[in-house]
Amino acid sequence: LRVTRGTVETARWCERYRAAGLSVGFAPTMGALHAGHVSLFARARRECDRAVASIFVNPTQFGPGEDLSRYPRPLEADLEACRQAGCDLVFVGEAADVYPPGYETWVEVEDLARPLCGRSRPGHFRGVATVVAKLLAIVRPHRAYFGQKDFQQARVIERLARDLDLGVEIRICETVREPDGLAMSSRNRYLDAAGRRAAARIPRGLRAAGRLVAGGETSVARVLAELTRELAPDPDLEIEYAEARDAESLAEFPAATLPRPPRRILLAVAARVRGTRLIDNLLIPPLDAEHSPARGAEEPRG
Ligand code: PAF
């Protein structure tokens, strides 16, 4: 595993890979790596000749009062995880290098960044889009890998890659879950036992709502009532949003009715569990798509 610390050094190594005719897969992260990240590295490894990761806690995507200063930074364990996963190179970024003095260029994706998390985290997707555009410009990968848990983020990144002609294929990879169904997240480590029990309601609620849709329910209100029935009674869990949206545009459905003819539907939740903000989602394929179960909140294992 090669560990690079500067943007110039990182770009130079990635350029060497490309010049040798090797395909480059890239998974950017903020560290505190878990099995979800490892699955991105593994897919990059499978699909590309070289797997590149980055670890950079990007300050510009945190709002005032968010968890930037206490965000976990277990660097040695993270480097070991990259090594175990077979990454070839990991860029460990420093704020002063990524945003040198005088930095003043921002990437803003408009409509896709407005709803859902964009509402409660103003400036968040501007920070994400900017740092991802920069990282893609440094690494210039053939493919880049992102988790479905952050579905809105992945859609924003797909759009910026397309709009800026970055020539990278964006791959959205299935959410990896704990045995109780909870989506893997670096923030899960903030949860105590009671928090874990409350948090596990989120995937349960998504699955219950998904079953209702699969059974033919088209009323958004009834689907969301099913979702919140699982979440709402828990005093440790405060819902920020629970919504059904078009999975491509992230727009709401007209007349609050799920579409027939079918479209891909996103059920998305953000909640605070004993102070920790968690998000999760379920993607429901068009109902006439044969044998394609909803992706995102599968039954727990074991
Ligand atoms: O999903 C994340 O960890 C971050 O938002 C990303 C994509 C690495 C950008 O900082």
Image (tube, grey):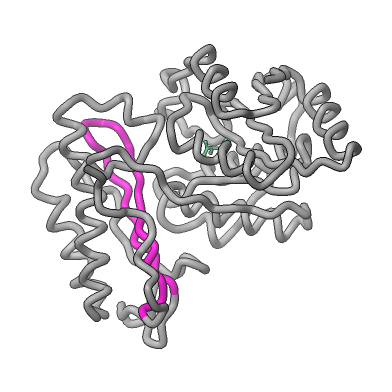
Q: Could you tell me which residue is drawn at 38 percent across and 60 percent down?
A: 295
The magenta region covers 264-287
Name the one closer to the observer, 245 or 196.
196
Q: Farthest residue toward the bottom?
A: 261
Q: Position of residue 18 (x, y in %)?
A: 85, 39
Q: Is 135 drawn above or below residue 73 in the view shown? A: below
**What is the quadrant of residue 131 in the picture?**
top right
Residue 139 at x, y = what percent?
76, 36
Residue drawn at x 16%, y 36% is 197
Quadrant of the picture in which ligand 1 is shown: top right
Left or right of 200? Residue 97 is right
> What residue is shown at x 48% (from left), y 45% (from top)?
122
Task: Name the spot of residue 260 as percent of width and height, x first.
Answer: 37, 86
Q: Residue furthest right?
A: 19
Q: Is residue 287 above or below residue 121?
A: below
Instruction: Assign the N terminus to one quadrant of the image.
Output: top right
Q: Is residue 265 magenta?
A: yes
Horizontal and vertical percent position of residue 187: 37, 30
